[in-house]
Image (cartoon, grey):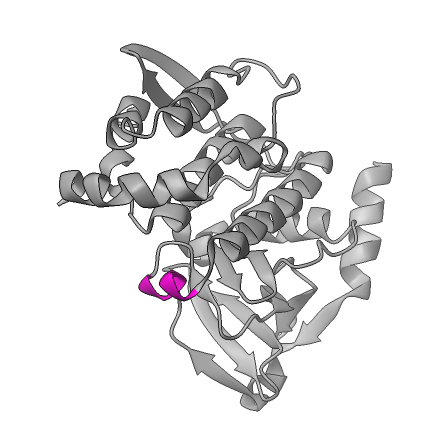
Amino acid sequence: LVLDLLVLLVSSLFFCDFSLKNKYTKLRSRGVNGNVYLNSDKTEIIKIFKNLYSIERRKKTLDYLMMFPLVTGSAYPKDIVIEDGCFVGYTADYYKNCCEFGSWGTYNYSFDEKIKAIRDVDFQLKELHDRNVIFHDINNCNLLIDKNGGHLIDFEDVICPNIIGMYLSKYILKHQERKVGCSKQEDQFKLLISSLNLLYGIKFEKFFTGNHNIDNILFFIKENKELYEFVENYFTSFSWYSDEAFPYLSEVIDKIDEEKIRHTVRKIKFRTK
């Protein structure tokens, strides 16, 4: 009851009237969940949901997120948006001149800049986990890199403690199938896949999506023995069935060697054609 009252109080303090939308420019939406509008000084976006059937769940999600401070460097929701007295979306910081982790533009970034972006996103993700929030939708489109670092965006589908639901995925490693609920471990696993995409310039996701076979990823990096062992050990270190401590990527990413990535990337790209 106390938590519900606190959520109600916080959500009543932060809101934005969507009647101000004429001051915003509509952007091409990254997804199917809604429309995105950008303010005139290009520092803030408004996300307006199209799928009203899930609006109540998203309102509860934002209520919980707004009980905490913003996560620096991310597009963490700032205010809820009200139209005709009804909740329709939220506002967040906008990061211009960015590239998605899986886009061609990442070739303009150095290895050190990419490592920093990965560290930044990992820190942002850990801060969410410390709040008992599961991001749930880690993928290349929701991870951005710019000259300042990395940014986690699109928070409307995160899983908060005040949301009831069970999401189950299956993963295969060394021919052993493991069923994993929506968890911190799954967030970290998906971040590692997207980080490899960024470092290699290869969309590993397309070889992984669907069957969730981790062996597919290991096959493509097998020439780089150190990276192969790093990725395999990272996967097997997870406590897939519990919420015990496990390594965050920023804690172990120094084991990834730039020269060996350069040496093996041509062979890997040949395999992925």
Which residue does the image show at 47% across and 53% down from the upper left?
Answer: 111
In the orientation shown, which residue stands out farthest toward the top?
Answer: 176
Residue 105 falls inside the magenta stretch: yes
The image quadrant of residue 245 is top right
- Is 17 situated above or below 249? below
Given residues 81 and 213, the one toward you in this image is: 213
Image coordinates for residue 1, horizontal then vertical, percent: 83, 36
Given residues 207 and 267, the one toward you in this image is: 267
The image quadrant of residue 123 is top right
Q: Is residue 33 left or right of residue 255?
A: left
* Magenta stretch bounds: 104-108
Q: Is residue 253 left or right of residue 142?
A: right
Which residue does the image show at 64% across and 71% down from the upper left?
Answer: 82
Image coordinates for residue 186, horizontal then vertical, percent: 49, 29
Which residue does the image show at 57% across and 57% down from the upper left?
Answer: 151
Which image quadrant: the C terminus? top left
Which residue does the image show at 32% across and 24% down from the upper left?
Answer: 214
Examine the residues drawn in magenta and state their main secondary structure: helix
Given residues 114 and 178, the one toward you in this image is: 114
The image quadrant of residue 194 is top left
- Is 59 situated above or below 43? above
Image coordinates for residue 239, horizontal then vertical, percent: 55, 15
Residue 6 falls inside the magenta stretch: no
- Is 41 situated above or below 105? below
Image coordinates for residue 103, horizontal then vertical, percent: 34, 60
Q: Is residue 21 left or right of residue 53?
A: right
Visible residue check, residue 53: yes
- Is 231 situated above or below 239? below
